Amino acid sequence: MPLRGQFAMIRSRIAMHIASAARPRTSRPLVAIKTPPHTLSKPPSVPGLSIFQTIANRGLRCLSTMVPIRQLESDDADYGSTSNLSPAPPQADAENFAAFAHANRHQKVKPFILKRRRDRLRTYADGDRDIRHSPWRMNLVCQFAHGLTVPEALKQLMFCQKRHAPRVARLIRRCAHMADEEDGLQPSQLEVAECFATQGVHLKRLKIMGRGRSGTMHHKHCHIRLVLRQIDFPTKILQAKSVNAKRKWLGRLKQAREDYERASVEREELAELERMAAELEEEAKKKKEGGEK
C-alpha cells in the first residue's frame, strides 16, 4: 500500500475512535429477577414481528420485575427469572420470556432457584430387575435415553442396534403411561431424568478348564432404574445458549400443549361416553325390574 493510503487509513481510524469516545454511554446496572407483584403490565404484542425482535423494547418485563443486584443480600424474597412461571406456560408468555432471557443472557440465576423449581416438578419412577445382562453393557443403552425428552429417547432407542434397547424403550413407555394415568401428562411433557443400570446378583457356575482344573464363572445380572420428570420449559429456555435453541424449546412447548389439550378433550369425551353408558344401563335395569313386577 502506498504511503498516502496508509495515512488515510490512520486518519479514518482516529476519526472513528474520537466519534466513539464522544458518544454518550448509558451504564446498565446489573439486574436480577424478582417475583412479580399482583399487578403486572404485560407488554403489547406486535403482530408480524419475530419473538426476538421485541428485545429492543426496554420496557419488556415478561412477568418479572428488574431490581438491582445489590438488593439481593438484604432481601429474603425468592429471586429468579423462572420463579413465578408454571412448567408449561402459555405460548405468548413463553415467547415474551424467551425474548427477555435472550436480552438478559449475561445474567446468571442462582443454582438454589433452579433446584427449588426442579424439586417442585412431578417425577415418576420405574425400573426392571434381574436382567441377565452385563450392567456395563446395559449402561451403554441407557446413555442413549438419559437427558432427552421421551419422544426423542424413544426415537434414539428405535435405531439403536443393542440387544436390550427394546426393553429400555418398553420401560420408558410404561413409565410414561403411568404418568398419563396419574396426572394426565403426555410423553412430550416428560424428560428422562435418570436412566442407569446397577449390578444384580451374579450366578456362580462351574467353569471346566484344562489339565483337570476347574474354576468359577459368573453369569452377570443387572437392574435398571428409570425416572421421568416433568419438563420445566421456562428453565430450558433460560439455559439455552443460542436463539435457535430457544426457538426449538418453544416449538417443543407448543407441541406439548397441543398434546395435553387433545388428551384432555379425549378424556372428557370418554368420561361423557361412560356416563351415558351408565345411564342407559340404569334405564335398562329399571325397565327389567318393572317388567318382572
Image: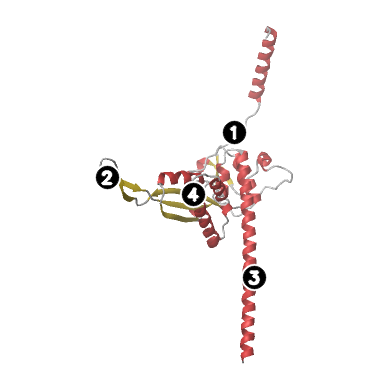
Displayed quadrant of residue 181: bottom right
Circle 3 — which element? Answer: helix
Q: Do the residues labelled 3 and 1 touch (CB within 8 Å)?
A: no
Q: Which amino acid does label 2 sit on?
A: Ser
Mark 3 or mark 1: which comes first in sequence? 1
| Distance between the alpha carbons at the discs numbered 3 and 2 | 68 Å
| Distance between the alpha carbons at the discs numbered 3 and 1 | 63 Å
**Does the image show residue 264?**
yes
| Distance between the alpha carbons at the discs numbered 1 and 4 | 41 Å
Left or right placement of residue 187 versus residue 214 in this view? right
Which quadrant of the rendered structure holds the N terminus? top right
User: Which marked residue is nearer to the observer: mark 4 or mark 2?
Assistant: 2
User: Could you tell me which residue is drawn at 74 percent across and 44 percent down?
Assistant: 48
Q: Name the residue under label 1.
A: 27
Q: What residue type is labelled 3?
A: Leu
Left or right placement of residue 266 versus residue 160 in this view? right
| Distance between the alpha carbons at the discs numbered 4 and 2 | 45 Å
Question: In the orientation shown, which residue stands out farthest toward the top?
Answer: 3
Q: Name the residue under label 2.
A: 214
Circle 1 — which element? Answer: loop
Mark 1 or mark 2: which comes first in sequence? 1
Q: What residue type is labelled 1?
A: Ser
User: Could you tell me which residue is drawn at 68 percent across and 40 percent down?
Assistant: 53
